[in-house]
C-alpha cells in the first residue's frame, strides 16, 4: 500500500472511494475557480504539455480518467481532434459541470461522460488508443489496481499521459511549497468552497504520492513497457508518459 492510499477525506471513517466521491460532489461548484486561482492558471499550461505528448500518435479514441469537470477532456478534444473521448469519474457532481461546459462548447459529438469506478472499469480490453489523467490518480484507493485497469483497456502500443501535482525536492521551492500548501491552499479552499478539510486532504495526498523515478517503476509494474517523467514549474507538477 502506498502512503496516499491511507489518507482519506473527512476524518477517514469509511470506504475511501465513497469519501472521495462525497468530497468532490461537495466542492464541484467551486472546483474550477479554485483550481485555476490556486495555480495562478499555470495548470492550463501543464495540461497542454501533457496533451502534446500524445499529438504525434493521433489517437482516435481517448479515455480521460478522473475527468472531474472535464477541462483536460475538452482541451484534448480541441488539440487532438479524436473521433471519441470518454471522460470517466466517480463524481457525478463534477461531471455534471463538465457536461454543461461540453454542451456550451458544442463538443457533445466527441465528448461524453460516464460514471466509473476507476479500479473496475466497465470497458473491454484494448478499447482506447490513448488514456489521459490530470490531477486525479493520487486519489485512487488502490494505485496499482487503477493503473492496471488503465493498462488493460489501452490498446497494445497505446499511450498514457498523466499530469499530477507533486512536491518540489529542491531548495527553496520545497520549503516554499510546504508553506503554501499547508497555509494558503486550505485557507483559500475554505473561503471559496467552505470545505477546508477537502483541501487539507488534497495537500496530504500530494506529499504522500509516489513521484519521479518511483512512479515510473509503479507504471512499469502495472504493465507499461516504457515510462518516463518530467518535472514542471520547479517540481510543483510532474508529467508522466507511458507506452503499453
Image: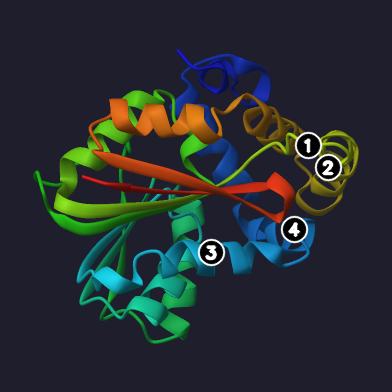
Residue topped by disc 1: 170
Find numbered disc 3 in the image and state the secondary structure of the residue it sits on. Answer: helix
Query: Alpha-carbon distance for marks 4 and 2?
Result: 14 Å
Which quadrant of the figure has residue 181? top right
In the rendered image, residue 98, in percent from the top left (x then y), is placed at: 47, 66
Nearer the observer, 77 or 87 = 77
Judge left or right: residue 38 versus residue 64.
right
Q: Earlier in the sequence, mark 4 or mark 2?
A: 4
Label 1 – label 4 distance at C-alpha: 19 Å
Q: CA distance from mark 1 to mark 2?
A: 6 Å
Cβ atoms at labels 3 and 4 below 8 Å apart: no
Identify the element where label 4 is drawn. Answer: loop
User: Callout 2 environment at 10 Å: few (<14), some (14 to 19), or many (20+)?
Assistant: some
Give the Cα distance between marks 1 and 3: 23 Å
Q: Viewer-nearest of labels 1 and 3?
A: 1
Crowding around mark 3 (Cα neighbors within 10 Å: few <14, some 14 to 19, many 20+) is: many
Question: Residue at position x 69%, y 57% from top?
Answer: 35
Residue 129 drawn at (x, y percent): 19, 60
- Disc 4: CA contacts within 10 A as few (<14), some (14-19) or many (>=20): few
Q: Nearer the viewer, residue 48 or 182?
A: 48
* Residue plotted at (68% across, 28% down): 207
- Is 173 drawn above or below residue 101 in the view shown? above
* Tag in front: 4 or 2: 2
Q: Label 3 to label 4, Cα distance in Å?
A: 12 Å
Q: Which residue is mark 4?
A: 39
SS class, disc 2: helix
The number of numbered badges drawn on the structure is 4
Q: Pointer 1 and pointer 2: residues touching (CB < 8 Å)?
A: yes
Q: Which residue is mark 2?
A: 173
| Image disc number at residue 47 | 3
Looking at the image, is mark 1 or mark 2 nearer the viewer?
1
If the image is split into quadrants, where does the C terminus sit? top left
Amino acid at each position: 500500500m502506498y502512503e496516499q492510499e491511507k489518507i482519506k477525506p473527512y476524518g477517514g471513517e469509511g470506504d475511501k472511494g465513497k469519501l472521495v466521491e462525497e468530497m468532490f460532489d461537495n466542492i464541484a461548484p467551486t472546483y474550477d475557480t479554485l483550481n485555476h486561482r490556486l495555480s495562478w492558471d499555470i495548470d492550463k499550461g501543464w495540461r497542454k504539455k501533457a496533451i502534446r505528448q500524445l499529438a504525434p500518435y493521433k489517437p482516435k479514441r481517448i479515455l480521460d480518467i478522473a475527468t472531474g469537470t472535464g477541462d483536460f477532456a475538452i482541451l484534448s478534444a480541441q488539440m487532438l481532434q479524436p473521433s471519441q473521448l470518454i471522460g470517466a469519474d466517480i463524481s457525478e457532481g463534477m461531471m455534471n459541470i463538465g457536461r454543461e461546459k461540453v454542451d456550451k462548447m458544442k463538443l457533445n459529438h466527441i465528448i461524453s461522460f460516464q460514471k466509473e469506478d476507476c479500479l473496475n472499469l466497465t470497458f473491454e480490453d484494448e478499447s482506447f488508443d490513448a488514456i489521459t489523467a490530470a490531477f486525479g490518480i493520487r486519489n485512487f484507493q488502490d494505485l496499482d489496481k487503477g493503473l492496471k485497469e488503465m493498462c488493460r483497456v489501452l490498446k497494445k502500443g497505446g499511450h498514457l499521459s498523466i499530469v499530477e501535482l507533486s512536491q518540489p525536492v529542491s531548495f527553496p521551492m520545497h520549503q516554499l511549497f510546504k508553506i503554501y500548501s499547508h497555509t494558503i491552499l486550505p485557507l483559500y479552499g475554505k473561503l471559496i468552497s467552505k470545505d477546508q478539510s477537502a483541501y487539507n486532504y488534497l495537500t496530504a495526498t500530494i506529499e504522500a504520492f509516489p513521484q519521479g523515478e518511483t512512479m515510473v517503476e509503479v507504471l512499469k509494474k502495472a504493465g507499461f513497457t516504457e515510462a518516463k517523467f518530467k518535472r514542471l514549474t520547479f517540481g510543483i507538477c510532474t508529467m508522466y508518459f507511458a507506452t503499453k
